[in-house]
Each structure stands twice: as structure tokens, then as C-alpha cells.
């Protein structure tokens, strides 16, 4: 039986990371096309869902263009080269402030990446921005005086849970197929469950929690 050809999604924001990598490999889709689609969708839905605290459009597009060149040459840095990724706003990403959902934090941009951001940057992933979190990640609701409320993706009258609610909502809406979060007692798993996406807490030591 012959394997069916890989189809191009009508809406590129709905493709998962595996699909994007496969489409990049056969040059059917460009990382630039995907990143532009994700950013446009984020701009449209952000006022309603408040999934992101910060989006770095310029840097994301520059990374996507570099990834496009590598895939065209058949020399991607990794399987996630050119795949858009968001980061919970508890994690350091170089060049962006880490506000942790709190007015008590500084607006100073970080000078270094957290380990997970560094590895993804080395792999050519497109770093989109910071997703909303509960203040210091210490509540099961994604709302704060700094960031406002991030509602449930299916019903805005309900909560998105926490503390990684912004990431779960972003994943559900197609605002980046990969979202990096933290989970001490359910902060990945609970928002994933109530927003209808997959969320995995890695084993301790598998992914560094620094800082």
C-alpha cells in the first residue's frame, strides 16, 4: 500500500511541529510563511484571549528567514528549525524581560537564555515571545495586576487554569505549535486539560529549571 502524500494544511497555524518539519523538508512550506501566519493570528486574537505578554515580531521573522535558507539548502540545525515556540513568562529568554506576571519585577531585558531557550535557539526554533502566567506561577488561575486575565479558550466566562494558562491558550488557538512552560504541581497539566491541548511535565532533571 502506498503512503499518501503529505498534505499542506489550509491554515498553517493549525499544523503541529512534526507536520511543519516534514513540510519544510520537502520545501512545500516556508518557516517565513508559517511565522507570518502565526503572528498575524496572534495579533488578531490577542485582544480577546490575552495569551501573550510579549511578542517579538521582528526577531521572530529574522529567525524564520534564516531557517528558511537552511531548509532550502537541506541543512537544518534540528527537527524544530523554523518551528515557532512560545515561552512562559517565568523563563529567561535573552533580550526579553522576565516579568513573572508581577508588577514587582523589573522591565530589564535578560542577558542570558534559560537552558531550554538556549537549546531551542541553537536548534533554529523561531522564538515568538512570552506567554501569560499567574503571578510568580503560584496560582491555578492565569490572571494578575500586571497581565490581566487570560480566559479559557472555549468559553471566556471560565478560567484557563494556571499557572501556564497563556501557553495552553496559545497552543489551542494556533499561536505557536510548541509552548514551553513550568510545572511544580500541575501548572502545565491543568491548563492543558481545561483548554483541550496536550501538556507534559518532564521528569525532574530532564529539562533544567534554572534559574
Image: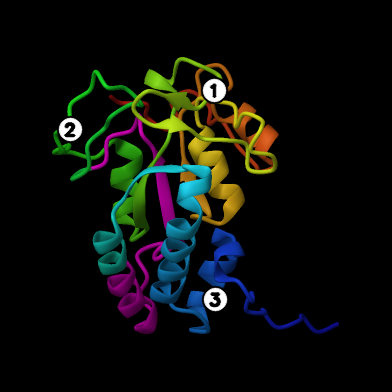
Provide the residue designation for mark 3. 23
The answer for how far apart the CA atoms under marks 3 and 2 are is 38 Å
Q: Start and end of the magenta stretch? A: 64-93
Question: Is residue 105 positioned above or below 37 on the image?
Answer: above
Spatial CA span between label 1 and label 2: 23 Å
Is residue 92 part of the magenta span, yes or no? yes
The residue under label 2 is 107
What x and y, as percent, mark residue 129? 34, 48
Q: Is residue 194 left or right of residue 100?
A: right
**Eyeballing the image, is 139 above or below 120?**
above
Q: Quadrant of the N terminus?
A: bottom right
The chosen color scheme is: rainbow
Image x and y of residue 87, in percent = 39, 42
Residue drawn 58% across the image and 21% down it: 186
Q: Secondary structure at mark 1?
A: loop
Q: Nearer the viewer, residue 120 or 197?
A: 197
According to the picture, the residue beneath numbered tag 1 turns out to be 141
Amino acid at each position: 500500500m502506498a503512503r499518501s502524500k503529505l498534505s499542506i494544511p489550509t491554515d498553517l497555524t493549525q499544523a503541529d511541529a512534526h507536520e511543519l518539519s516534514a513540510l519544510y523538508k520537502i520545501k512545500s512550506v516556508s518557516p517565513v510563511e508559517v511565522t507570518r501566519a502565526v503572528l498575524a493570528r496572534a495579533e488578531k486574537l490577542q485582544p480577546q484571549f490575552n495569551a501573550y505578554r510579549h511578542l517579538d515580531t521582528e526577531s521572530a521573522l529574522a529567525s524564520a528567514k534564516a531557517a528558511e535558507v537552511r531548509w532550502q539548502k537541506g541543512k537544518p540545525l534540528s527537527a524544530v528549525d523554523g518551528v515557532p515556540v512560545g515561552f512562559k513568562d517565568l523563563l529567561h529568554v535573552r533580550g526579553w524581560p522576565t516579568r513573572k506576571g508581577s508588577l514587582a519585577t523589573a522591565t530589564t531585558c535578560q542577558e542570558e537564555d534559560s537552558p531550554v531557550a538556549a537549546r531551542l535557539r541553537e536548534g533554529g526554533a523561531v522564538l515568538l515571545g512570552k506567554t501569560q502566567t499567574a503571578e510568580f506561577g503560584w496560582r491555578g488561575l492565569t490572571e494578575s495586576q500586571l497581565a490581566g486575565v487570560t480566559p479559557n479558550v472555549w468559553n471566556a466566562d471560565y478560567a484557563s487554569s494556571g499557572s501556564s494558562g497563556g501557553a495552553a491558550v496559545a497552543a489551542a488557538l494556533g499561536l505557536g505549535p510548541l509552548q514551553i512552560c513550568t510545572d511544580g504541581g500541575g501548572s502545565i497539566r491543568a491548563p492543558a486539560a481545561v483548554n483541550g491541548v496536550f501538556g507534559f511535565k518532564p521528569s525532574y532533571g530532564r529539562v533544567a529549571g534554572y534559574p
